């Protein structure tokens, strides 16, 4: 049976691992400490208990324990030696990702495809860290992963058509469609959505409106499911700030200059849903 490596047991990594396991695939979920892996195990178990309430693109009526048995938890990259794909979900930091790919490239077999779950960082730049640039591709999953039916897939400069076809087939096994785009920082989704979130934070900072009023305009006037500040809280304000910094550095365009209020909130530990407090309380 195909085995998939998942690096990073945060919100996205847990969602990816759960979605893969629900699709009948074997998973190796890797993070740096046993504590984080124990937390991830508890999160996935809880999500599986309530999966019927939030829906799943890879829905399964199997018992939660059967699905959990498909996930192996590990703190070592050597567990990736026999996987067919690696889906990397580490922090949106070039330094972190650089260290990961330099370490896993010699461990993984030559046929293994590297799927970069990033919102902003260049796929071509990551491919250059490896000896398999033709097998490096961006797969920007949306949160919550099990409930989202479409993935933004990014072709790097050297990404092969065979790699794209293999990833599309894997996504199909997970019950997901892909939208294939080209590689520029932020791609489509975050290049646009982070402008919304950043400007919404400026609106709150300038006391034009409250977070609730900003989000209500997007939901009630534009028909969006979530407002930009609710979305920022869901993603994590620290991740939003990281992404804006990458976009600003990449394009040297002032429109991506991070709102000071966002920076201040992150410095205060207000990271959104995962910390219990962001623009809203949880």
Image: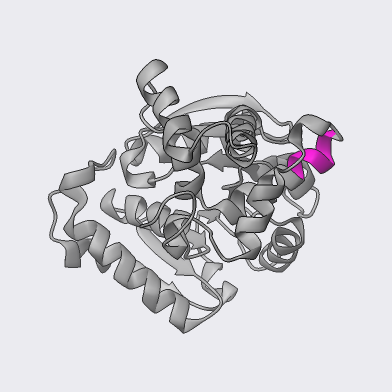
Q: Which residues are magenta?
A: 246-251
Quadrant housing residue 3: bottom left
Question: Up-down: is 268 above or below 18?
Answer: below
The residue lying at 47 percent from left, 29 percent from top is 178
Tell which of 123 and 227 is nearer to you: 227
Q: Is residue 250 magenta?
A: yes
Quadrant housing residue 192: top right
The residue lying at 46 percent from left, 76 percent from top is 36
Tell which of 255 and 120 is nearer to you: 255
Tell which of 78 and 54 is nearer to you: 54
Quadrant housing residue 98: bottom right
- Residue 221 left/right relative to 58: right
What is the chief secondary structure element of the magenta stretch? helix
Residue 35, horizontal then vertical, whole percent? 45, 82
Question: Up-down: is 94 above or below 72?
Answer: above
Residue 127 visible (yes or no): no
Q: Is residue 136 magenta?
A: no
Q: Quadrant of the C terminus?
A: bottom left
Residue 83 visible (yes or no): yes
Q: Quadrant of the N terminus?
A: bottom left
Question: Up-down: is 16 above or below 206?
Answer: below
Residue 236, horizontal then vertical, whole percent? 52, 53
- As drawn, the residue found furthest toward the top would be 221
- As drawn, the residue found furthest toward the front would be 207
């Amino acid at each position: 049976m195909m085995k998939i490596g998942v690096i990073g047991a945060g919100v996205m990594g847990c969602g990816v691992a759960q979605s893969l396991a629900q699709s009948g695939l074997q998973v190796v979920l890797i993070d740096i400490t046993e504590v984080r892996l124990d937390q991830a195990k508890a999160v996935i178990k809880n999500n599986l208990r309530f999966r019927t309430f939030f829906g799943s693109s890879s829905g399964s009526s199997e018992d939660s324990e059967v699905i959990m048995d498909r996930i192996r938890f590990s703190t070592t990259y050597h567990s990736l030696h026999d996987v067919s794909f690696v889906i990397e979900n580490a922090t949106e930091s070039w330094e972190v990702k650089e260290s990961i790919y330099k370490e896993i490239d010699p461990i993984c077999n030559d046929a293994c495809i590297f799927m970069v779950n990033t919102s902003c960082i260049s796929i071509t730049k990551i491919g250059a860290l490896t000896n398999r640039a033709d097998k490096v591709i961006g797969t920007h999953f949306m949160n919550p992963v099990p409930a989202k039916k479409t993935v933004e897939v990014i072709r790097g400069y050297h990404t092969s058509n065979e790699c794209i076809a293999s990833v599309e087939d894997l996504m199909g096994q997970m019950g997901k469609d892909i939208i294939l785009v080209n590689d520029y920082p932020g791609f489509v989704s975050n290049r646009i959505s982070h402008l919304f979130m950043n400007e919404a934070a400026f609106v709150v900072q300038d006391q034009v409106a409250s977070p609730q009023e900003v989000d209500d305009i997007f939901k009630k006037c534009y028909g969006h499911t979530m407002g930009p500040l609710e979305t920022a809280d869901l993603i994590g304000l620290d991740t939003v700030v990281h992404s804006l910094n990458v976009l600003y550095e990449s394009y040297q365009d002032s429109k991506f200059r991070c709102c000071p209020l966002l920076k201040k909130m992150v410095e205060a530990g207000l990271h959104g849903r995962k910390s219990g407090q962001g623009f809203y309380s949880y």
